[in-house]
Image: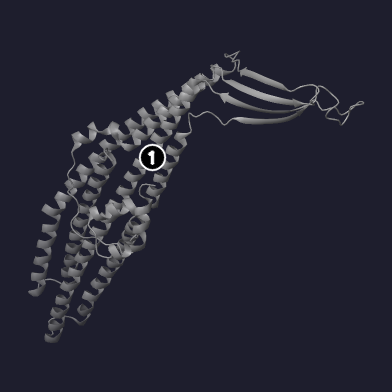
Amino acid sequence: MRIFLAAAMLIPISSALHAEPMTLDAALRLAETQAPELRGREAGIDAAESSAIAADRLPDPKLNVTLQDFPVTGPDAGRLNRDDFTMQVIGISQDFPNPAKRRARATRAQADIGIARADEAVTAQDVRLATALAWVDLFYAKKRLKELDLLDADLDGLQATVTARLASGAARPAQALEPEQLRAQVQDRRSALTSEIARARAQLARFTGDPAADTAGDPPSPMIDEVALRAGIDALPRLRALDARALAADADTGLARADKRPDWTVNAAYGRREPNYGDLVTLGVTIDLPFFAKKRQDPKIAARASEATRARLDREAAKRDIAAALDADLADHLMHHEQLGNARSRLVPLAKKRAELDLASYAAGKLDLGAALLSTLALAEAEVDALAREAEVARDAIRINYIYGETAR
């Protein structure tokens, strides 16, 4: 119940506290308290810790109340005081599982706690990654929309130029429609970006609990420490979760081995008879006899040991998958970096230069307006595409750092 009370207090006032745009760090902190899956994992840890308290305790004693040897036929049928065998018995018994079994149960309970904590770490990593990606997607979608707004302003200037040239007779009447046609194409792109903004905001709101979620500040640096990432693979939450399951499989193997050791039960009973015959006391010990282990306990032990082997092999396979995925993601990140550099150093400057030259040619009456407008649109698309590439680089860095780098959480 560590974060339940704090989270419950935050929920009613979350909208008021986070109506303003939030930085990425603020969004992550909010997601850690508002994401319901994290609170669910906390409940799972509490459940495992509570179960561990009773894991190695003795079972409850048993009370036995019996009417023994009561005659139902013959001359004494239905009479309690005519037969010296008839008595009312009250007894108590206590089972004592062998110490190895109790230790194995305690070890298994601790393994369950480890699994619950590892699962919480995996869920926390997933929540932080999804929140960060939603924040970055929203940030860059808004930035790309601003580029289209700048193009709209340029189109207003072009429209004024066309109107002046129409008035002087230097332009054809049909040319007055060309800026509006371009504006209609820009509107299609604006609609797509508006939808993208809405999707990213909905995703950010899903984890932060803020229906008016918005971004503030700058995205994180896209720097990646490849050496540190490779060195920390073994400590990743997903591998820690598999380690916890391997320990649980070992505990199950120990529990199966403990079945080869006998359990025992102590019982005591007091039998009350008709006063003429006297009362009786019974004391006894019952001991399990684990004979024929080759057909009973040994197959179970072998099965649990095989499960433990499989758990370790699954862990090794997962480690190789993660290492291969890291290599692939680093390669993609390098590619996206190169594409972003190409866009900034060549594609956007070339598109800008062409648009300037075409507009100058149009102003001098050497180029058709439609061609000049297409150059202007190509420049806007180049700038929007550069932002999309920048967003891809930022997404790569977040994915790599959050998937392969969050080993301490």
- Identify the residue shown where x is 59% and y is 18%: 296
- Identify the residue shown where x is 54% and y is 20%: 259
Q: Looking at the picture, how far across and down is residue 379, in whole percent?
A: 16, 63
Quarter of the view holding residue 65: top right
Q: Is residue 18 visible?
A: no
Q: Identify the image quadrant of the C terminus.
A: top left
Residue 85 vs 133, above or below: the answer is above
Q: Is residue 161 left or right of residue 38?
A: left
Counting labels gives: 1
- Identify the residue shown where x is 24% and y is 59%: 22
Q: In this view, does 13 lie to the left or right of 373?
A: right
Using the image as rendered, state which of residue 82 and residue 68 is in the foreground: 82
The amino acid sitting under disc 1 is: Asp
Q: Looking at the picture, how far across and down is residue 125, in whole percent?
A: 32, 44
Task: Return the residue at label 1.
Answer: 119
Considering the numbered disc 1 on the image, is that residue within a helix, a strand or a loop?
Answer: helix
Q: Is residue 358 left or right of residue 74?
A: left
Q: Can residue 70 be seen in this view?
A: yes
Residue 216 vs 395, above or below: the answer is below
Q: Looking at the picture, how far across and down is residue 270, in whole percent?
A: 69, 25
Q: Looking at the picture, how far across and down is residue 360, in whole percent?
A: 8, 70
Q: In this view, does 287 lie to the left or right of 2?
A: right
